[in-house]
Image (tube, coloured by chain):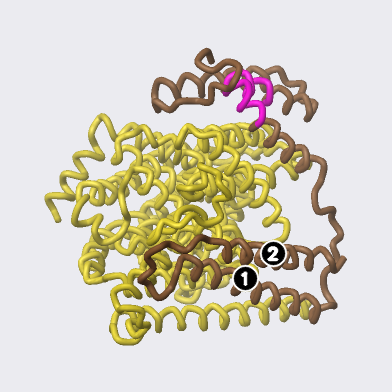
Chain colours: A yellow, B brown
Amino acid sequence: MMDHLLNGLMTALSFDILPILIFGVVGGIILGAMPGLTATMGVAILLPFTFGMESTAALVMLIGVYIGGIYGGSISAILLNTPGTPASAASVLDGYTLTRNGQAARALSISAISSFTGGFISTVLLIGFAPVLASFALKFSAPEYFALALFGLTIISTISGGDIMKGLLAGTIGLLISVVGLDPITSVPRFTFGVQDLYNGISIIPVLIGLFALSEALTQLEGVISDKKQKLDSFSLKMLSRKDLKEIAPTAIKSGVIGTVIGSVPGAGADIAAFVSYNEAKRASKTPEDFGNGSIKGLSAAEAGNNGVTGGALVPLLTLGVPGDAVTAVLLGALIIQGLAPGPLLFTYNPDIVYGIFSSMLIANIVMLVVGLLGIRFFCKIIEIPRILMIPIIMFLSIIGAYSINNSMFDVGIAAFFGLLGFLFIKLKVPLSPILIAMILGPMAETNLRKALLLSEGSWSFLYERPITLVFLGLTALSIYTAIKLNRKQKAVIAEVEAAK
Amino acid sequence: MKTKSLIFPVIVVVISFIALYFISQFPTPRFQDASVTSKFFPTAVAIIQIIICFFIILGELLNRKEISYQAAFFNKYSLFGAAFIISYVALIYVFGYFISTLAAFIVYLLFFKIKIIGYYITAILFTCAVYYIFANVFFVALPEGLIFGGVL
């Protein structure tokens, strides 16, 4: 393992790869810093352009965008009171108060150091645990993979944004889309209507470009005229002190661990990690009244928590081939584009790629810290870039990206169709991530179910005779129960708040 | 007011029934030794979809008190955006990347009555830079179009 890791580090630091990594991190920070542009969108737009790149370089760049994007979201949260990404919503609470007090540079430097701490801890834990889980997953065969895919599909109930039924409906739409093409077992054409381009099924990449980049660009376009030009008040360029560093260190480390654990649970994203870390820091604090009033511990907890997710979220993706959220689903697309199959066999057949990813994550966090601390003045300029100019650029890059995967105008049509459909779904408050998750896990569930039935000669007994399958089915039931319970609790809290008004 | 939230699940139900019809038309392979066929999974999904829609419709009908849509569903900018995407896809198919992107970018800026000359320069620079970077750095082919195939 150490050999692979050292080789990975050498690769990540080589003259070929390091500039790509820096480009990815800086690009991610810039995209994340612009309100409305998320890390998912950044990875989705850049994904097709990595097609011609060598595997490690391609993945390193996207990992850089992911890590940079999550950190970048906090810049506009701190400077403008507008979270660049949902993950940095908790950073607004204390970060913006510090900015109002003329301490924007201090807040941004705390954010950079805490994000680095969270991201670095998360990567170290990923390196420690992922190979263990992957070697366990090697014992899986068709019934276990079917149960795992079923468990993965229950993520939909937790990422449905409060409306489980609409999330499930979006999930079934994704499942139906995933069956288009030749049947994986008997090669019977399904929903192809004689169209040659549909025989290979609907490619995931144009769908995700449409859903996460084009639809978001359309949403941004709606509010672009009412958008005032962002101007910042002048602030002191004094960064955090040694005393600040001592004060935030334990909180950042603890939040990094919390973020990693939450990130490794499918469905729980960086926004949840940030708020849980923030609440835990507040609970453990001797001065909880400072939280929300410019507490550096509060800001540190939120930032370390959301960046802690970056490593954690890759655990189920790399070891089991199950994406935990939208951005890892997009990264899964990147692995597929490179001809790699995420899952336990990736560790066996492509250890250079896996440890290349791990090493580049370690380096990406360091790059993020350096860029984050040195680029404070520059980032203040980024948020002044007019959105009216960014929106067409996103649209053009999305369309060109969709084309470049297979040099196919059909894929462009798919991206445009899903862009418009995604925009309509945003309007109808139907969550988009379930569509993508279902499109990825649907074929895995169907193929393995039918393989399992063939192996057991048509008997469904594999569902209760195999212990790992049984455990996954139990987890599936538990996941649905927890999601329903959480949803009810959430609705009760909303009703309480509305009643109080 | 109420119909807006009901139309979507109703449309999905209709689509599900259409899907079920097409599923019933899937050809059956000559050698079928599995207990479930290629129809099983999509049929199960379509039925589950109908059930979910039924619960959504029921929920909307029972929960009558809320919902008052004040804002318009789309504004003119989002409609322009949708038309812009469709037109750009059609343009790129006929004229290829270079001309379509430049033309679309300028039309976009004119629609929003942008008078800042720097934005138009950005449009030209962006189009050229993407063309150069994709061809020479990413080695990704850009659409050439029907008319200028092989030229631009």
In this figure, which residue is indicated by the disc labeled 1?
Answer: B49
Residue A45: image location, x then y, percent: 51, 40
Badge 2 amino acid: Val
Residue at the far left in the pictured view: A3
Occupied quadrant, residue B117: top right
Q: Chain of mark 2?
A: B
Residue A112 lies left or right of residue B19; in this view the side is left
- Residue B13's place in the image compared with A222, above or below, is below
Which residue is nearer to you in this view: A33 or A481?
A481
Let me know if residue A491 is in the magenta part: no
State which tag comes first along the sequence, 2 or 1: 2
- Look at the image and give the residue range highlighted in magenta: B90-104
Which residue is nearer to you in this view: A148 or A112?
A148
Let me know if residue B100 is in the magenta part: yes
What residue do we see at 66% from left, 30% from top?
A: B90
In this figure, which residue is indicated by the disc labeled 2?
Answer: B12
Per the rendering, the mark at residue A123 is: none
Residue A413: image location, x then y, percent: 60, 39
Q: Chain of mark 1?
A: B
The local crowd at label 1, few if under 14, some if 14 to 19, many if 20 or more residues have their Cα within 10 Å, is: many
- Residue B73's place in the image compared with B110, above or below, is below
